[in-house]
Every structure is written in structure tokens, then in C-alpha cells.
Image (cartoon, grey):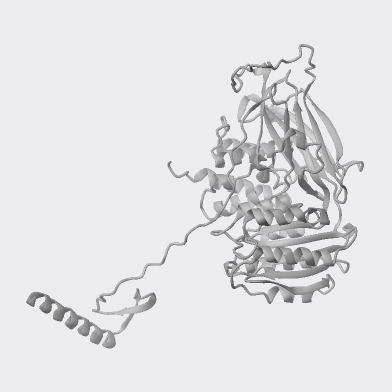
Amino acid sequence: MKNICVIGLLVIALLAAGCSTWRGKKQRPELDFYVGGETATAYENYIPIVAMKAPMPEMNTDEFAAIEPNRFQRADLQPLSTFSIDVDTGGYSIVRKFLNDNELPPANAIRSEELINYFSYDYPKPDGKHPFSVYTELASCPWNDQHQLVHIGLKGMELETKDLPSSNLVFLIDVSGSMDEPNKLPLVQSSLSMLTDQLRENDYVSIVVYAGAAGLVLPPTSGMHKDKIKKALYDLEAGGSTAGGEGIQLAYKTAADNFIKEGNNRVILCSDGDFNVGISSTAELVDYVKKQRDSGIFISILGYGMGNYKDNRMEQIANQGNGNYAYIDDILEAKKVLVNEMSGTLLTIAKDVKIQVEFNPAVVGAYRLIGYENRMLQAEDFKDDTKDAGEMGAGHSVTALYEIITLESGESLPDIDSLRYAKPTVPSDASTAEMLFVKLRYKLPDGDESIPLDQPLPNKSLPWQESSQNFRWAAAVAVYSMLLQENPNQGMADWDLVMSLAKSSKGEDPNGYRAEFIRLAEKASLMKPIPK
């Protein structure tokens, strides 16, 4: 006990001496340290006996829907492949955000079709009978020389801004506490300010915000009053919880109250997707927007921020609400989506666009669709006009790739047990002139009945080195996505192949998007995956 008392007195004496020294010595700014979370400056000959408070590590709560890459299907057993188109581009800029932060993206963040469709392609313009054209091409597969690669492209009709119908836009802005970061609400304000600059006198904007509750902060205002719209935007501040469902309800009501017949009626939601008050579950939100599909009001989802980002929720809302989805990681992406591609983002030229490919089992042994995993439909959904599908905007292009194992290759096909009641057979007189038959169905924006559009693909293949620029660029992005996913079907794919394909098909690239892709691919090639 006596020893303990002596030690205690010594500690007190040292502390007293230290405090005396603290008051009398010259400051040394280079010896900063933390005391209870506050920064202090140490003094010469002073050794503080304090606990240093380490910053708490940030918890990453990003959410991405699980993706299981499509597998090869036997053409003799399943000759039909049916899916909804996807013009969303959010997946590409999310991957870019990770790479620019020197991180490899999680596999579930990689939706191959959104990476491929981030870029425009030089497809033939529609002839006027339909709002989009159909393009097909067949060449050898760059990552497996025993396989073939089918390229299917759609090109929407283009409209000048002056020719767009009048717009009734509702900016639905998340101003909750989670948006109080430079790459969230301030970037939203800059993004929508650029869009405001594109508006005409006959376009109208309303602003609805939500945090703990939702409210209308700007009634419908003509695009001629740009300063008024921008002031309302820049007066917004973030704080509070997130009543996202209530905000969506008010936004749709505002759009409906100011509906422009034969106009462009659209809600533009800007958020990180972290809804936590009221209607907040993904299922409830998706159910609500599904019920609004017949109202003639479309939706555009613009995602912001990372670290607590709910990509799965944002994508589903867009998919189910007759909408499109983009992720805004910086101001240049905002310009791409809301200025360079404004007509495609805001004006729908065809809705419920479905593609069904029928493979000729006399030629095709097996096939797999690259991407579109969360857009797959049942064969019977194709002609079912009550079944929702993707929307296509003015000037948009849509690209899909199929990897093909031909019967001629002699490669073994996915095996199954023998059938008890029926044995699939290939008719001996089946024609080999066609590899497949592409069928499309779509509705006009205000229509309820689908319109068919069909086109065969001849069984004539070229070496991929002789394929079109469109083909090689899409293949480059497909390889990029497979390598990032560590897709089991990547064959001989490597980063050298990505660079070779991309550099040979870069083309004119007026906005630099393809040059940026090449830079990102080079960066990704230098990053090593974490050992499993």
C-alpha cells in the first residue's frame, strides 16, 4: 500500500511539473497532438500523459443488388431469349467512381449492359416508320476464337431541343442530413442549374424537397424565369431524416396537378437513396411507382454520393416507374446526362420495349446474353402488353451482345439428364441460312398496344478484326466488365485485349468519353484484386 501511495505522489508531482512547464515554454507547432478530440500544441520538454482519441472508421453501407452472370443455354431446349431493353448508365459512372478513388468496384456494382450502353453507337437512323432502327452484326468472338459474337443495336430518332414538346418537370430533391456533403446536395444544385439553362419559355419547373417531411418550395415556374428557379435551388440546405416515400408521392401529385397533355411530364429524383421515414422499403416504393405508370408521368433517377448509397433501390424505382437511371459522380457527368443528352434523358419515344431472340437450333448449340441479368423476361411476357419493360429516349442507342457456341465448333454443350417424356430434336430439313431471328415489341409513349418489329440475322460471320467499329467498341467494354466481375465465361480475355479493341475503335470521340474509358481500363489493369 505504501508503494502505491509513493507512486501516486510521483505521478501527481510529474503532472504538476508538466503543467508548470506547459505555461512557461515556447510553442512548437510541429508537435501537434489530440487531447479529448481537440488539437493542442506541445511544448518543449513536456511529455503529456494523455489518451489520444483516434477517429472512428467510416462504415460503408453502399447497397447493390446481387448479380449472377448469365450462363450458356442450349438452343435446342430453350430457343427463345427474352429481355427488356436498358438505357440506364448508372453502372458505368459508379464503376468509374470506384476506380477514380483507387478501388476496384464490387462485382455486384457491375451491370455489363449499363457499361456498354453508356456510349453512343453509329447505327443507321430510323426511317420514320418506327421510332428506332435495328442493326445486327455477326463476327468471331474476340475472347474465344471458337465462339461467335452477335451484336444487336437499336437507334432512337433524334430531336433538337427546339422540337421537344413542352415539359412539366418536378425536381424532387433529397435535402436530408445524409445529403450534406460536397458531392451530394451542392452537386445536385449545380446539375439542375445546368438543366435549367436549357429550358424554354414553354417548359415549367416545380421543386419538391423532402427531409423529415416533404414540401413544395417552388410552384410551377416558366423556364423564362431561370434566376427564380436557380435561387430556389441554391437556397436549399440539408438536414434531418429522409421521408423519401412522402416526397415521391408529393412529386407525382404536383406533376399530375400541372399535367401538360401531349407534353413531357416527368419527375426528376435526386438522392443517395437512403430513405428511412414513411414509405421507405424498396418494395413499398417500387409498388407505388408501378401504380403511377399509367398516369403518363415518367421518372428520371439521378443518384449522388457514395459510402451510404442505395444503388439497388434507385435502379428498381427507375425500372418499375417508366424511367431511366444515371449516377452523377461529378459535374461533367451531370453535363453529359442533363445537357449533351438532355432529349434522351427527358423525352421517351417508345416504352415497354422488349427484345426476343429466337435461335436456330440447326446452327446454334448454345448462347448466353452478356448482361441484362435483372432485365430477363419469360418467353410468354413478350406478347403480354400488361408486362412492363424498358423505355427508350430520343437519340438513345441500345446494344446487346450474345456469345454463341455453334454446332459446327464441335464444342461440348451444357449437359442435362435425358428427358423421360420427350426428346428434343433438330429438324433435318432446318435451314442453316439464318443464325437467329430478332423480334421486338414496343408501345408509343401514350399507347397501350405493342407494335412488332422483326429482323433475321444471316449465318455469315467475319473475323472480329474485320468487324465494324461499333462491334469492336462494344466488345471492348464487354471484356472490361467481365474482367472486373471475374466472370467465369471470360475465356482468353485480358487487359491487353481490352486496350487493343478499344484503341482500334475509338473513332472521333468528340466528348472524350471513349478516351476516358481507355484511361480507366489502363488504371484497372494496374490494380490487383484482394486475394480470396
Residue 475: x, y in percent? Answer: 66, 36
Q: Nearer the viewer, residue 21 or 439?
A: 439
Q: Residue at the location (30% across, 72% down)?
A: 51
Tell whether 188 sits left or right of 169: left
| Residue found 78% across the figure and 33% down from its top | 136
Which quarter of the image is occupied by the C terminus? top left
Give the quarter of the image for residue 477. Answer: top right
Quarter assignment of residue 222: bottom right
- Image point (59%, 73%), residue name: 239
If the image is split into quadrants, where does the N terminus sit? bottom left
Q: Seen in the image, is 462 located left or right of residue 179?
A: right
Q: Position of residue 224 (x, y in %)?
A: 85, 72
Q: Is residue 396 visible?
A: no
Which residue is situated farthest in the right direction here? 129
- Tell which residue pokes out farthest to the top in this image: 428
- Residue sitting at 72 percent across and 35 percent down? 378
- Total tally of numbered discs in the picture: 0
Q: Is residue 32 above or below residue 62?
A: below
Residue 173 in view of the camera:
yes
Residue 146 vs 485, above or below: the answer is above
Residue 521 at x, y percent in the picture: 58, 45
